[in-house]
Image: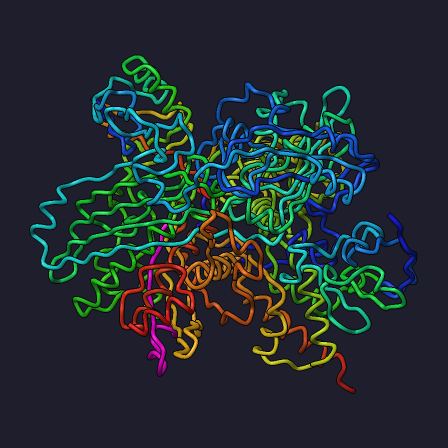
Amino acid sequence: MSDGNQGGVNLKVVGQRPIRPDGVDKVTGRAQFGADFHLPGMLTGRIKRSPHAHARVVSIDTRAAEKLPGVKAIVTSADFDAGAAGEVEAGESHAAMKEVAANCLAHGKVLYQGHAVAAVAATQPEIAAEALDLIEVTYEVLPHVIDVEAAMAADAPVLHDDMYTKGVTPKPGKASNVAAKHVMGRGDVAAAFKAAGVIVEGSYETAAVHQGYIEPHACVASWGADGQSTIWCSSQGQFLVRAMVAKILNMPLSDIKVIPAEIGGGFGGKTTVYLEPVALALSRKCGRPVKIVMSREEVFLASGPTSGAVMDVRLAATKDGKITGAEMTLKYQAGAFQGSPVNLGLMTAFACYDVESLALTGYDVVSNRPKVAAYRAPGAPMAAFAVESAIDDLALKLGMDPIDLRLLNAVRDGAKTVYGATVRCCALVETLEAIKASPHYQTPVGKGQARGVAAGFWFNVGGESSAAVHVDEDGGVTVVSSNPDIGGSRASMAMMAAERLGLPIERVRCTVADTTSIGYSGSTGGSRVTFATGMAVVEAAQKIVADLKRRAAQTWECDIAMVEWKDGVATCIDPAKDVKPLSMKAIAGKSAKTGGPIAAEVSLNAQGAAAGFGVHVCDLEIDPETGRTTVVRYTAAQDVGRAIHPAYVEGQLQGGAAQGIGWALNEEYVYGKSGLLENASFLDYRMPVASDLPMIDTILIETKPNPRHPFGAKGVGEVPIVPPLAAVSNAVSRIVGRRMTSLPMSPAKVLAEMAK
Amino acid sequence: MPRVTSISGRIADFTGGVSAFQVEARTVRALMRELEGRFPGLGDFVEDQMALAIDGEIFQDALGAEIGADSEIVLIPKIAGG
Amino acid sequence: MSRMVVNATVNGEPVEFLAGGGQSLLDALRDELRLTGSKEGCGTGDCGACSVIVDGRLVCACLMLAPEAEGTRIETIEGLADNGHLHPLQHQFLEQAALQCGFCTPGLLMASKALLDRNADPTESEVRYWLAGNMCRCTGYDKVVRAVMDAAADLRQAEKPR
């Protein structure tokens, strides 16, 4: 690309901090989120959920509910198309549609408390609630299993009698809860341990945690008599919702229009469907629009948390700290259906380090919990917690500075990852050095406090994206994005277009289109939007520039090579021509005379995404009376390639760190003996609030822009949730005087450890 | 000849346990055809559910990507993220 | 279901609406008055996304019954900007990128306004503890706290006698 990567030279808009195009709507209450839509004749939908952790559904009697005045439709899994099959690109991998459907409305068995069994649409919320009570479900309660190792036991109650462990040869003869075994590795691990100067080992566990978006799932679905339907919903991907609903209800894609609402947080948790097929099935039955909004309790009970994990890790190193080999076993909860991110845990666990010999084993295990959904760097934070704890042990054992130890082992360009990729444009070393040189790390640890350090990695992805750029008749520009804006991507899209077109940012607006108004795009996830959809925006803007130059050349009757486009103005560089420069406005105003409207749409499948690395340092103190941990200082540094809008990049680092701190200290799914969730509320599921946290300092490392993106961007959203678990626990372990191996490090657990 | 390995044990379900082999293919599309021919079901499985690292660079859904005469190809699970 | 007529002042304008006995103020604002800027994140008073100011007091609209609003003066996010001019809090939230998804933002802004209405010069700790009832999952609160403190400074500057 001749003028592709500008490498930060002469950038006028990229790297600035303009106000986001959708900002005013969001600070004035005008932004329309999923639950804010209202249509004439709209009904309220509600979902009947299982009170049991595991049971066979013997019968569902809806007769009494149907007779209740105001009830317009009732659906069960029988209303889904039985042939729903195949797979759809989803959050963490591919989602088997049969299982997505059975998660939306239980088929034959309920597999966790809160599993949907039926749904009703009624004219009033009160009537819908009353109708739910009138639906009689007869259950045959089955033994349940909650914890991952219990679910793996030979005598555990089996959730799916057709599930045979994949990845094992020969194929097992008996169904089990282990959906798959994953093995990866290289080198000679046994030799590495035999030759090791130092060996550290540990066993770790983390609790299931929820993404915790503040906006509960919500949608409105309206089925038309001709089958053409519209869905308004809050999701990370309008095209993904369309694909899943079409499969589950056996409809052609073109008969479903999905209009993306503003989305109130997702973090991966809104890369699947729970309500949309149910609402549309209800609407199909009664011909009226149906709105369903989850309560917070339903969000906790029946939308995806991420896996709790049980992990063993063992490191072999030389006496001067070079890690030569590692063994690791990961057991990840998948929830009620297969598909935990355990393979991603294996792939990321040692991605920060150049380790010659690795033997990694992972198990994907179902149990009577809600099906996990993607959560920010799916699978990576737990594995990193174990590995970074072990590396901290190694640093203690060797008396080495934890950053120096990581610098000694850090991957550099050209290193081979265990999953086959070669490390490129990697700034992990610079990121470690930046933390080492930071005012935070240079300040001695406060009295009674301790400091923890940890690193983290995420792949970041590219993938399919579409974008359009439309030039208005007055020379202004609209960028049409195909991805829901979850954290400011309208700003980065508009900025990249403005940069390439040479316009001030105020002349570029950005909108997010529905499924009928722009080409297909993958979801907002995988830290891909600024990279992949941004690439589509820039390519569309380049087409516009080429078109503008062509029109200027036509106007001046000169060769197009004689036209230069700079700062939003076409200039003729042919000394023989005495013509005035043509502004965007001038060309746009006469577009009818030079070929018609000026617009371009680009659809692509972006390759060349670059991985990201983060290093966090955390200072904290513990109240010896209560066991409560208080983080007093926190700094997050990250290899970001190039920050398009640095304030929103900083925000990603700060938000990821806060989520990771919550994961480390407080958040967990708590189950009682009966297999029921005991803390399905924000009061009892304790996410960090403002008074729990200090300011979170950020350092953006921009020394290695990604050469495969026009401005050098790397994904930034997921990396920052990877290091905090260990950064926090490494510090807590210092104060407690013993390795903390179990998350969350809730006050009771910390007190118990301190008393030992 | 290009050499194919996999970091996913799932491949063994199709290959009967073989985890490394050489191929003739010089594009990803040809590779899928070849895998499907040798191990029925594997080509479709890889095309739908896996990504490839070709000489260290990750490709997802890139059937047109070229494979060199001595390329190292690693079959890896598709990566999406949150 | 019997519903009662409720008269109140919302954002300076008199309003009249029908409310069920068990209906929350939040549902009345959103469903009857179509003021959907106040959000429901939990319905149990834990997240603060529905924060509004009633007779000068910060309340979670999900915890107040709609009939209790009779005769009150209610301020919601829709009334924070003055005739299209953003409040300094709104301005600072935008300037400092203190929102990502924006769902908790209306509640955070109303809670912050209630704070600045009674404390023109809050410390960082005072801001953090006052906003402890308003959950934000995106930002880690850093930029939110900075925005509130800078908006307080803007308001103090504007109040200064010249």
Instruction: Assess whether residue A366 is covered by the magenta stretch.
Output: no
Residue A520's place in the image compared with A202, above or below, is: above
Which of the two residues, A506 or B60, is positioned nearer the viewer here? B60
Extreme-bottom residue of the structure: C161
Which x, y percent locates residue A226? 75, 19
Q: Residue at x 39, y 36 (%)?
A: A157
The quadrant holding residue C69 is: bottom right
Q: In which quadrant of the rendered image does the C terminus of chain A lie?
A: bottom left
Front-lying residue, A23 or A739: A739
Res. A409 visible in picture? yes
Along the viewing direction, whichever of A287 and A680 lies nearer the viewer: A680
Percent coordinates x, y for residue A696 in the rendering: 48, 67
Looking at the rendered structure, the number of numbered marks drawn on it comes to 0
In the rendered image, the residue lying farthest to the left is A195
Q: Residue furthest top?
A: B37
Whole-percent x and y of residue A567? 61, 49
Instruction: Look at the image and name its color scheme.
Output: rainbow
- Foreground of the two, A128 or A431: A128
Question: In the picture, which quadrant includes the N terminus of chain A?
Answer: top left
**Residue A195 falls left or right of residue A415:** left
- State whether residue A75 is above or below residue A488: above
Task: Report if residue A1 is visible in the image.
Answer: no
Q: Is residue C110 left or right of residue A744?
A: right
In the rendered structure, which segment of residues is drawn in magenta? A438-457
- Tell me residue B21's x, y (percent): 21, 23
Magenta highlight on residue A449: yes
Task: Place residue A261 in its image quadrant.
Answer: top right
